[in-house]
Image (cartoon, grey):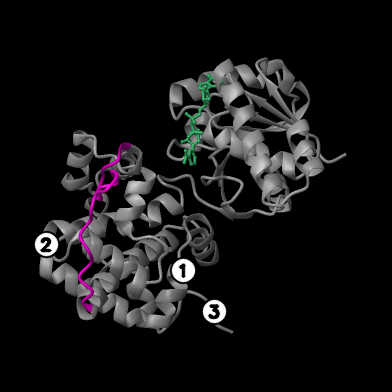
Amino acid sequence: MPKFDITTSIGVLGAGTMGQGIAQVAATAGHAVVLYDSSRTALENARSGLSAILQRQVDKKRMSQSSADGILGRINFAHDPYKFATCGLIIEAIVEDLAVKRNVYSQVESIVPPDCILASNTSSLPIAAIGASCDKPERMLGAHFFNPAPLMPLVEIIPGVATAADVVQATCRLIDRWGKTTVLAKDTPGFIVNRVARPFYGEALRLLEEGMADVATIDWAMKEIGGFRMGPFELMDFIGNDINYAVTETVFAAFFYDPRYRPSFTQKRLVEAGYLGRKTGRGHYDYRPGAENPAPRQDRPLGEQIFKRILAMLINEAADAVFWQIGSPEDIDQAMIKGVNYPKGLLQWADEIGLKTVLGQLEGLQKEYGEDRYRPSPLLRRKVRKGETFLSHG
Ligand code: NAI
């Protein structure tokens, strides 16, 4: 029998937004799932929420009634953590608080079998710090799903300092079998996606603050010229400015205040004013009934300038993530396409535009502003010098 046998039942710890989605994914793949939460209300909401989601699939004829019943029937909504006693893998998705997580891991470890893998869905806490609360940190790792988990194909797999290699392999193998795309990321702030995506918001906010264009025009440029599904401001309003700002602030602090990740006052003020986005009816845009929002200035040369500047910053971030070995070039490109729906991998894009052109843009910005924010990644410089591309285009 293999050491890490995760063909058995899967435990999901925390029945909130992410826990529900992950339980649905595992049950759809045929596993018996124990979905545990300390709150009975959260469990009831999870049961009714999942039931409604599956019923909608049946109504739209995307799923048979018996499949929907099967998925729901495989999930045990548990208020007793001892139900984890036979699980081969636990995926934890409770509140994003290190002290609470560490406490829960030490409790759960006394219940689960000795070879049970413990995975955290944390978006911002160090895996090493969570693992340190375990008796056996070698069986603990990060498995970062994206919201909504049943629809978003990406899962970042993050080994901590102590994680054993066979734990990483067994987890990747299993989650790949669920139809997801796993990428390996180093245990550093934001992992791949939440690090590499920062300039999509940060540079857009900067252009707004500089008065280069308004919100609608920047969104228009990124969608119309860049091919992104949503513009940065629409996306910030969708995610919630509070959440998006908190991620930026966490990443900024975690990088020892590297100016490249500095948060924006404009977004901070929106959060302070309660303009959180769609959920409060106001954000960068006004969502209240009957509200009118300004139309974009559809000025193509201006749009090109906006798009090229944000893209150059995104490419620089992706290049630097390769430089610091946060992920492989292939994984970094996959992560941005499958985790945040980018129209193309950033490194592929860089190769197509020409690395020299991208480097020239960044050097121009650095010269203009004299800020470290625009410093080109050493890897970009090195590749230009050697005449190399990021990916092999055979
Ligand atoms: P949520 O607030 O919707 O759900 C958290 C659940 O954990 C609640 O039902 C709560 O009752 C339960 N809980 C809290 N403390 C507990 C304890 N000690 N024992 C058992 N249950 C407990 O949170 P959400 O959004 O699902 O996030 C969960 C985790 O997933 C966090 O680590 C977050 O950073 C991460 N994440 C969130 C994403 C999102 O878009 N919401 C995306 C990717 C990761």
Q: Point out the tag, 1 or 2, that comes first from the N-terminus.
A: 2
- Residue annotated with mark 1: 343
- Location of mark 2 (residue): 211
Q: Residue 76 at what x, y percent from top left?
A: 73, 25
| Some atom of ligand 1 lies within 8 Å of the CB belonging to the residue at label 1 | no
Q: The residue under label 2 is which amino acid type?
A: Gly
Taking the image as shown, residue 13 lies to the left or right of residue 129, namely: right
Q: Residue at x 27, y 51 (%)?
A: 261
Asked if residue 38 can be seen in this view, the reply is no
Residue corresponding to mark 3: 392
- Residue 285: give x, y in percent of width and height: 25, 50
Give the residues drawn in magenta, as a range.
Answer: 280-299
Whether tag 3 and tag 2 are in contact, CB under 8 A, the answer is: no
Mark 2 close to ligand 1, CB under 8 Å: no
Say which residue appears at 41% left-offset and 50% top-offset: 194
The foreground one among 362 and 49 is 49
